[in-house]
Amino acid sequence: MDAGSVNSLSFSTEEPWSRYRKPFTKVGSTVYIPPLRSSSSNPTSYRQSGDRFIPDRSAMDFDVARYLLTQPRKEKENVGVVSPAKEAYRKLLAETLLNNRTRILAFNRKTPISTDSMLIAISEAGSSNHSKITKRKRYIPQSAERTLDAPDLVDDFYLNVLDWGSRNVLSIALGNTVYLWDASKGSTSELVTVDDDLGPVTSVSWAPDGKHIAVGLNNSYVQLWDSNSAKLLRTLNEIHRSRVGTLAWNNSILTTGGMDGKIVNNDVRIRNHVVKSYRGHQEEVCGLKWSESGKQLASGGNDNLIHIWDQSMATSSSAAARNQNQWLHRFEGHDAAVKALAWCPFQSNLLASGGGGADKCIKFWNTLTGACLNSVETDSQICGLLWNKNERELLTSHGYSQNQLTLWKYPSMVKVAELCGHTSRVLHMTQSPDGCTVATAAGDETLRFWKVFGNPEMDKPAAKKTYSEPFANFSRIR
């Protein structure tokens, strides 16, 4: 701060008694103290009043003074009797009757505070605190925003034939055909229809770029397609001995899981694409999910097992160790097939898993320590799991017996909402790139869109729209 600003500050904050100071007075000279009793600004009044200060008794109330002197003793005697409500009432009554006087010796009377204004201030303070604490509730529609036909959807729990890419294009496999639906434009196109000896299509998965898509087939082949040109780029064969029911991307690595229990990492950029194999499941692999960091892979199988594979453990130089990786953790807590897997977006090393019809439980795992953190009974088969990207919530899709979607608050696992509409088990579930919309496909051959993960600030329902058009009239496309 410069000198000019300091001078301006000294003038603006000048003390009231500074006007008694004489100009050019030597620093350290006697300081004049204005009188407490008199309000006169004349220095001569100080000399006339002498050297003693005599208080003005007209401003005193001796009855009040006696009450204030004796009241503390009475309060100590009744300290265990007075309730909080009576104590608050006593304080308010004392402030009102005593005109807010708390000093025995008062030199000037304080302006009395109106009781009405006091109560209004208390009420306003309480309401303002309540408004700060209370959080606006999010409106969750109880019905699907859009329902589309999905004929020839294979009713098989172990398949994964629905995925939503980063470019807002949804892919779904119906029988031998893969369809693409552009959510931004509302347009539908057919990507590929495979021959009967190859199909049906058993899995689909978008690459991170949202342009390329992997298609797993019943005959163990995996095809890579360019969605823009609808061109087949390459076919990965001799990976598995039977159908490929699940796929997962980790940058340029495509991980495939088959009915033969094998898990294979394929680098799609090179000719010899098989770079690693994981062996741990004895039956079909039906769930694969890479963590957000890409360092850990979770796999679930029909043998009721979950394996956690660590990418860093595959750095051995020997070819045998490089191609045959050992799991980091093996979880045996479920009593049925584990297809539903989901990594937590806001807490690393937290994995949620859901069991099939004989298990019906959601379990939470710490993949760093291998501990099971919690287990929640849901009373129905769990087909899918999705974390909310905007709130600490988890969505589950269910089969028998209610075929519902259930929204849970994490970590309390209190039910926030239950959404019904499907008449058969909700086999597949995927999330839009913005995290607001969820698409579900069920055995009733319908594809539904739900705003269950909508804007957290939304507290009013939007105008409801009714859709009954088929999913691009698949019968005419074929």
Image (spheres, rainbow, N blue to C red):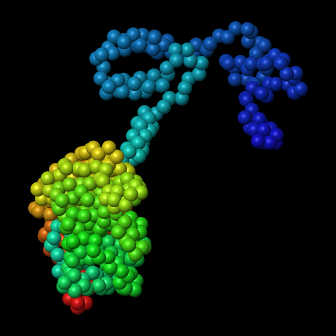
Front position in the image: 404 or 52: 404
Q: Residue at x 45, y 14 (%)?
A: 68
Front position in the image: 327 or 153: 327
| Residue 101 relative to residue 286: left or right | right
- Position of 186 relative to 132 (above/below): below
Front position in the image: 202 or 324: 324
- Residue 186's spot in the image, x, y percent? 34, 81
Residue 117, quarter of picture:
top left
Query: Quick check: can you spot residue 342?
Result: no
- Position of 400 relative to 344 (above/below): below
Q: How many circles with numbers are drawn on the protein?
A: 0
Q: Residue at x 77, y 12 (%)?
A: 48
| Residue 429 relative to residue 444: left or right | right
Quadrant, the C terminus: bottom left
- Position of 169 relative to 391 (above/below): below
- Residue 305's spot in the image, x, y percent? 20, 54
| Residue 71 relative to residue 461: left or right | right
Residue 337, quarter of picture:
bottom left
- Residue 15's spot in the image, x, y percent? 73, 29
Q: Residue at x 73, y 12 (%)?
A: 49
Q: Residue at x 88, y 21 (%)?
A: 26
Q: Residue furthest right?
A: 24
Query: Quick check: can you spot residue 12?
Result: yes
Quadrant, the N terminus: top right
- Residue 7's spot in the image, x, y percent? 80, 38
Residue 263, quarter of picture:
bottom left
